[in-house]
Amino acid sequence: LRRKEAAASAALLGAGYTCLGIPDLTIAHTERHKRIVTGLLRAVHPDLLITHPPVDYMADHEQTSYLARDAAFGSTIPNWRALPPIGVRARRPAPPCAALPALLYADPIDLATPEGGRATARQVVDISSVIDQKAAMLAAHASQREWLHQQHGEDEYLHWMRRVGVERARLFRKKTVTHAEGFVPYHGHAFPRHDVLTQALGTRLVKTLPAR
């Protein structure tokens, strides 16, 4: 059910969807899982990889962050063997990526850090014109939305997304920007350091914030 919902959400964006087949609460920063994520990256050769922040409210998110970073690095190494996603048979292994993708960490849920602080962003992207499309994509995950609705007694699942967007929009200091998303670029060894967001979207939609 969750796979069908995720595919339906991606279709609203005109995007593809691949499930790596690792169940909830079992995602781990292991050799096997790194090889599986590497297999996906080599299949699509991304220019940009967006993942969870390395410090988040649940282990699945944090482990995914580590897996994405390490698999991206391994995707370019010829002697690092990749595995196809669980349940997917590949005719032949995809070749290594020619270059590392730019890596961005997305905002954590409710912009909250585990110790109760507020997550910072280095770049914010204006999503005012597509906020309703984002809400429709999130609502497509109906089973999770309904479960959280029962927990909270209201449709907090969608309220949270819009509330966070409004908070990030304040960083633009423009009345025309009503909703935004925040990101932190990863500039570890060998990863690209150029500003991929501004290069792709332009200065009208992207604002880079001063380092703290």
Image (tube, grey):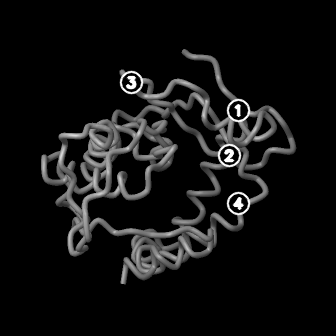
- x 56%, y 68%: residue: 15
Residue 69 relative to residue 164: left or right: left
Q: Position of residue 160 (x, y in %)?
A: 56, 57
Residue 24 relative to residue 132: left or right: left
Sequence-earlier tag: 4 or 1? 4
Sequence-earlier tag: 4 or 3? 4
Residue 184 relative to residue 51: left or right: right
Quadrant in which the C terminus is drawn:
top right
Alpha carbon separation for disc pair 2 and 1: 9 Å
- Marks 2 & 1, CB-CB < 8 Å contact: yes
Frontmost of labels 3 and 2 is 3
Identify the secondary structure beneath mark 2.
Answer: strand
- Marks 1 & 3, CB-CB < 8 Å contact: no
Identify the secondary structure beneath mark 4.
Answer: helix
How crowded is the residue under tag 3: few (<14 C-alpha within 10 Å), some, or many (20+)?
few
The vertical placement of 142 against 78, above or below, is: below
Q: Which residue is mark 1?
A: 171
- Residue type at the position of mark 2: Ala
How crowded is the residue under tag 1: few (<14 C-alpha within 10 Å), some, or many (20+)?
some
- Marks 4 & 2, CB-CB < 8 Å contact: no
Q: Which residue is mark 2?
A: 180
| Quarter of the figure with residue 169 | top right
- Residue type at the position of mark 3: Ala
The vertical placement of 55 against 152, above or below, is: above
Q: Is residue 49 or residue 176 the one in the foreground?
A: 49
Q: Position of residue 127 (x, y in %)?
A: 71, 51
Q: Which residue is mark 3?
A: 190
Sequence-earlier tag: 3 or 2? 2
Q: Which residue is mark 4?
A: 131
